[in-house]
Image: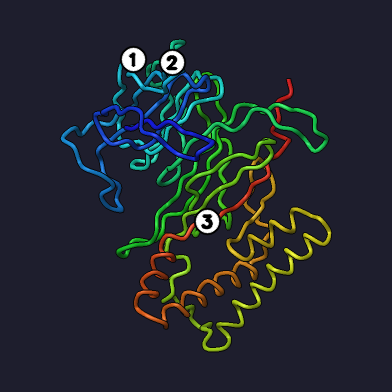
Amino acid sequence: MMVYRLDVEKASLTRSSDITLPANVQYACPHPSKKFLYVAASNTQPGSGPMGPVGADKNHYALAFKIDAVTGALTPHGQPRLLPARPLHVSTDQDGRFLFIAYNLPSRVTVHRLAADGSIGDEVIQTAKLDFGIYAHQVREMPRQFWDEHGTPQRWKSRIILCSRGNDAANGKPEDPGHIEVFSFKDGQLANLQTIRPGASGLGFGPRHLDFHPNGRFVYVSLEVRHAFDPDFARPGFRAEGVELYAYSIVWLLFGVALLALGFWRDVAALRHAGMANVKNPLAPVRPPILSSQPFIPSWANSLYQTSMHTTLRKYQGTSSAYSAAGQAIARELCVAVAFPVNPGMVDTK
């Protein structure tokens, strides 16, 4: 693992130190105090293929390092903790008292106490029967403070949020649905609170990572939707050809440009953002309970977007084999985004 110095004025990085780990880095996160760094490490390879050299050590680790306040150099801190499987993500609560680790196979989350000196303590054994979805990918604590529409600070109860991506259909195996799990959290114990599955089934919804708006009222989620816009796909009874293919792309582009123009004319940021999203990626704000599953974006608009992407990739596909390969690669790895407002009804103001 390498440490670099950042020169903001020159926008440059200078390598300052290295540290050798027992296994490949999977993810790292700082303690809220910025005095410690927590690293998840494993030599196990993901199902999609090799992502680094496979070492002889087959263990999975949670590691803590002290961060030098002057140089940024890392030194091992406390005993490494062995984990039950390959970890994908690691994060802390906002008080720096607990460490959360997400695993994809099998899908789960473990909770570890953090000692007062920042070292990693024992796992907190969960007493409830928990649903972690399929192929968990990221675990975070939701912000505990947010500002309402009047600018008044409010406080949430402690909530943990987990992205479970699901899996694509492959080799005769049907698609595994994706969803987002929200847990209550108290004294190291998790309890299922809400499941978010747009479209009820969760099919076609592959949440991979999320982050929070600074005001604490919105969650932004990136979706991994493999093969969603495959150039070779065709729906029975609906196959656009020729001029019709180009018409869909043009209509969708004009729709996005119109939203942008209206946003600038009326000075409405939401319209400008919607215009940019409609030109590039579908952005679907969703309503409560805590987070909800009924998108504002109408189904016809999403279908139109999919057809537009299909059209664009088909045009490249007909140009040359190089463009075709590039188009299919983009289609396989396409990520889109959604936004979820958070429900003030879950606020704990006591």
Q: Position of residue 62 (x, y in %)?
A: 34, 26
- Res. 112 in view: no
Could you give the CA–CA distance between mark 1 and mark 2, rounded to whole angstroms? 8 Å
> Is there a contact, CB below 8 Å, between mark 1 and mark 2?
yes
Could you give the CA–CA distance between mark 1 and mark 3, rounded to whole angstroms? 44 Å
| Residue located farthest toward the front when viewing the structure as drawn | 10
Q: Which residue is mark 1?
A: 78
Q: Secondary structure at mark 3?
A: loop
As shown in the figure, which amino acid type bears the numbered disc 3? Answer: Ser
As shown in the figure, which amino acid type bears the numbered disc 2? Answer: Gly
Q: Which residue is mark 3?
A: 201
Q: Estimate how packed mark 3 is, as few (under 14), some (14 to 19) or many (20 or more) residues with alpha carbons within 10 Å.
A: few
- Res. 183 in view: yes
Label 1 or label 2, whichever comes before in sequence order: 1
As shown in the figure, which amino acid type bears the numbered disc 1? Answer: Gly
Label 3 or label 2, whichever comes before in sequence order: 2
Number of numbered discs overlaid on the protein picture: 3
